[in-house]
């Protein structure tokens, strides 16, 4: 830490000495909590492109957005008193990741919860990379924060096709968190349907694949036990906003 950033109130000790009834008592300086909050943000791994996502700047375009926002606010308000996490389901670009990131940001700000964001593919890749002989990280280096964080966001569930190994690993992670009353927030582009024939609108179809096709029956049923489903609909607002910003 550079010289000028040291707190002037406590000279960086985190404590302030005060006189109370003739005796000196030490109380925490406000910078102590600021540092803790910053450390929580730093370790949450929120991707740069989502850094500015808040519940307050989520754009409501339809009723599903309104409902999702209401549920998300309620989730933050109730935390940690609720039993279930959330799974945001919907097509690309409707704001699922924005919502999940905004929730953990508020949980850090308001409740000082230990939160962690992981893209599903990235997590699998990181665990697999620890198996290579020259890896400097062990499997538990990657998994410990995933197990221990109070709230985990697993973004783009199903984006990587499950192999038996992936399914087993993810089930293990999710089950462990479930058994220890840790909240998990999922997002997925894959529709949830048991129907053999997918009659939904075309943007939901990905070669006819559903969430079950991508992650398997056992994992899907565990996620449903531990999460409330939040369906989000709409156009690809991210793409539309980007296109609108290109001036010709
Ligand atoms: Zn201070």
Image: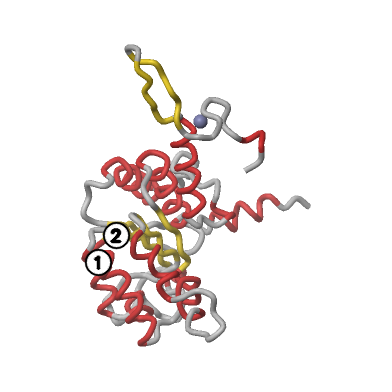
Helix, strand or loop at mark 2 = strand
- Determine whether label 2 and label 1 are within 8 Å by CB: yes
Which residue sits at x=41%, y=45%?
108
In the rendered structure, the answer to whether residue 199 lies left or right of residue 12 reads: left
Q: Which mark is residue 224?
A: 1
- How many neighbours does mark 2 have within 10 angstroms: few (below 14), some (14-19), or many (20 or more)? some
| In the rendered image, the vertical position of residue 203 relative to residue 21, given as above or below | below
Q: Nearer the viewer, residue 104 or 245?
A: 104
Residue 221 image point, x, y percent:
24, 73
**Residue 16 picture location, percent across and down:** 45, 26
In the rendered image, residue 147, in percent from the top left (x then y), is placed at 34, 65
- Disc 2 residue: CB within 8 Å of ligand 1: no
**3D distance between C-alphas at marks 2 and 1:** 8 Å
Q: Which residue is mark 2?
A: 229
First in sequence: mark 2 or mark 1? 1
| Residue 48 placement, left or right of 160 | right
Identify the image quadrant of residue 117: bottom left
Question: Residue at point 45% right, 52% down?
Answer: 101
Task: Give the residue at the far right of this rendering.
Answer: 248
The residue depicted at 53 percent of the width and 25 percent of the height is 9
Task: Give the quarter of the figure containing the N terminus.
Answer: top right
**Near-viewer residue (20 or 78):** 20
Q: Quadrant of residue 83?
A: bottom left
Which labelled disc corresponds to residue 25? none
Q: Would you say the beta carbon of the disc 1 residue lies within 8 angstroms of ligand 1?
A: no
């Amino acid at each position: 830490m550079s010289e000028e950033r040291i707190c002037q109130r406590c000279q960086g000790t985190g404590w302030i000495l005060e006189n109370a009834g003739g005796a000196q008592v030490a109380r925490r300086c406000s910078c102590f909590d600021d540092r803790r909050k910053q450390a929580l943000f730093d370790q949450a791994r929120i991707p740069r492109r989502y850094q500015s996502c808040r519940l307050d700047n989520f754009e409501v375009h339809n009723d599903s957005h309104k409902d999702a926002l209401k549920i998300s606010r309620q989730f933050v308000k109730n935390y940690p008193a609720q039993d279930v996490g959330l799974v945001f389901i919907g097509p690309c670009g409707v704001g699922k990741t924005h919502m999940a990131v905004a929730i953990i940001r508020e949980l850090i700000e308001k409740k000082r919860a230990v939160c962690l964001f992981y893209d599903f593919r990235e997590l699998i890749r990181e665990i697999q990379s620890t198996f290579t002989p020259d890896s400097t990280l062990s499997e538990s280096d990657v998994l410990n924060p995933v197990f221990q964080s109070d709230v985990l966001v697993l973004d783009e569930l199903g984006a990587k096709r499950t192999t038996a190994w992936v399914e087993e690993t993810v089930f293990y992670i999710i089950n462990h968190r479930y058994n220890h009353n840790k909240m998990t927030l999922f997002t997925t582009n894959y529709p949830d349907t048991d129907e053999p024939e997918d009659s939904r609108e075309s943007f939901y179809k990905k070669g006819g694949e559903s969430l079950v096709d991508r992650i398997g029956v056992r994992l899907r049923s565990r996620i449903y036990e531990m999460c409330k489903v939040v369906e989000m609909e709409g156009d690809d607002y991210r793409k539309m906003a980007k296109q609108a910003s290109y001036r010709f």
